[in-house]
Amino acid sequence: MSIYPPSLERLINNLSKLPGIGQKTAARLALYLFRTSGEFNESLAVSISEVKQDIGSCSRCFNLTDADPCKICKDPSRDGILCVVEEVGDLLALEGAGAFRGRYHVLQGVLAPLDGIGPENLRIKELLARLQQESVNEVILAINPSAEGEATATYITGLLLKQGVCVSQIAQGIPMGGDLKYTDAVTLKRAMEGRRESC
Ligand SMILES: [Zn+2]
């Protein structure tokens, strides 16, 4: 039997479904929400439901947006380089870091044949269509370095090369603050392969 009253128990259960939130944190958040002003809780509830009503995917790049096409696609100062990412979160991280000033294309996943995710489940067809419609000088693949990510990057590289598009892949290697002696063999090998020359 639960130690919490049913409405608090329901809130804890719902909060614990959020990524990175376990039962303990969910209980702490629920008790916090119980103690805060009703006004804050109302505003939180409204913003949770608004996020589903007002935000959709950009029909060009599949970024999250409240207007279609999104701000990035509409920005004329963004140059002809297209950065392909797995998820919207990756796009937001690159934007937040100011690491890239071109346009993006969100694949909405990676190839995962064991989970039944093939090329037709990703936004690959739309990527190829954009290359016909927009002026794109280069495509940068910024796909996460997993086995599925690599297979996806190889597959897309093949398609893009056939269309005569210049393709590059972001560097992989030792992260900032990393230590060579604690780095796994695959990462060390990649770091050596991706070294930068200056001579
Ligand atoms: Zn867009």
Image (cartoon, rainbow, N blue to C red):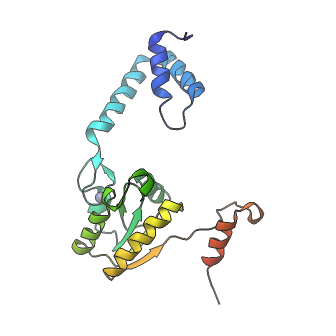
| Image: 134 above or below 65 | below
Residue projecting furthest to the right? 181
Above or below, comparing residue 46 to residue 8 in the picture: below
Work out whether residue 52 can be spotted.
yes
Nearer-the-camera pick, 149 or 134: 149
Ligand 1 position by quadrant: bottom left
Quick check: 170 left or right of 194? left
Is residue 122 left or right of 86 when viewed as pictured? left
Q: Which residue occupies 27% across, 73% down?
A: 131
**199 up-or-down from 6: above or below:** below
Is residue 98 among the parts visible in the rendering? no
Which quadrant of the figure contains the N terminus?
top right
Residue in the image at 55% along x and 21% along y: 27
Residue 13 at what x, y percent from top left?
48, 23
| Residue pictured at 24% horizontal, 69% vertical | 129
Where residue 171 sits in the image (x, y, percent)? 55, 71
Assign the C terminus to one quadrant of the image.
bottom right
